[in-house]
Amino acid sequence: MRRCVIFGGAEISDYDHLRTYLKEDDFNIFCDSGLCHMEAMGLRPDLIIGDFDSHPDPHLDTPTIVLPTAKDDTDTVYAVKEALRRGFDSFLLAGICGRRMDHTLANLSILLMLDSLGKEALAVDDYSEMEILSPGKEGKIKDQWPYFSLVAFGCESAKVTIQNARYPLDHAAISCEDPYGISNEPLPGQTALVLVDSGRLLLVRVREG
C-alpha cells in the first residue's frame, strides 16, 4: 500500500532534508497553504484539499476538494480523514509545525488519532521527527540523532523503559505534569531503545541542539 504524504502550510526551510523522507510512489496531498511548498519540493499533487483562505486555488488539472471556510475540521485534519477513507495505513506529515501554536498542537494530535487507529505516522520538520509510542511499539533512536525527548501525550502519565541512552529508565513514569524526559542522548555507537508499558508518549528525535 502506498504511503500518504500530507503537506501543511507551516514553514519549511530545509527542503533537501525533507526530500530524504520521500518515496517515488507516495500519494501526495497538499493542503491549502501547503501548496506554497509544491514548487520547491518539485512535486505535483495527487490531491489538493483546502478552503483556500490562505492560498489561492491553483486550478491545476489535479483532483481538488474545496472545503467551506466554516467547518469543524482543519484542512489538514480533513486531509488525513480523506486519506483514511481511501484506505491508507501509513502517513508522513510535513509542514505541520510552525508559528501558529494552536495549529501545531492540533496537528500533533493527529498522530494520536492515527495511533489509535493502528496506523503508522511520522511528522517531520526542519529540526526533528516525531511519532507516538504506545504499548507494543518500540522506539529506536540511532546515534546519528544527537538528542531525543519523550513527552506524555494524550494521557496523564506513561510508564517507560529506556535503554542504551545517557539517561536510562526502568519502568519509570513520565507524567504530563512532570516532563523530565527531555534531551536524552543515545550512547555513542548504539541505538537507544524506548519501550512503553502503558500510556502514550510523543517521541521527538532532534537533529540539532
Image (cartoon, helix red, strand yellow):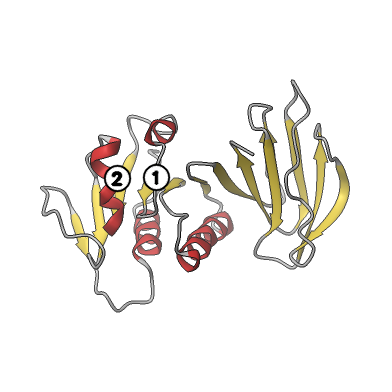
Please give left or right for residue 14 compared with residue 186 in the image.
left
**Residue nearer the viewer, 192 or 178:** 178
Give residue 26's position: percent from left, percent from top.
35, 37
Which residue, as the protein is rendered here, is positioned at the far bottom? 70
Give residue 109's position: percent from left, percent from top.
54, 62
Specify the quadrant that holds the C terminus. top right
At horizontal 37% and vertical 49% (from top left) the residue drawn is 6
- Mark 2 residue element: helix
Distance Cα–Cα, label 1 vs label 2 = 8 Å
Looking at the picture, does residue 101 appear above or below residue 12? below
At horizontal 77% and vertical 51% (from top left) the residue drawn is 181
- Mark 1 residue element: loop
Q: Badge 2: how crowded within 10 Å, few (<14), some, or many (20+)?
A: many
Residue identified by numbered label 2: 37
Callout 1–callout 2 Cβ contact below 8 Å: yes
At horizontal 36% and vertical 54% (from top left) the residue drawn is 8
Q: Quadrant of residue 179?
A: bottom right
Residue identified by numbered label 1: 12
Check disc 2 and give the amino acid type. Answer: His
Q: Quadrant of residue 2?
A: top left
Give residue 184's position: percent from left, percent from top.
75, 41
Please give left or right for residue 52 compared with residue 134 in the image.
left
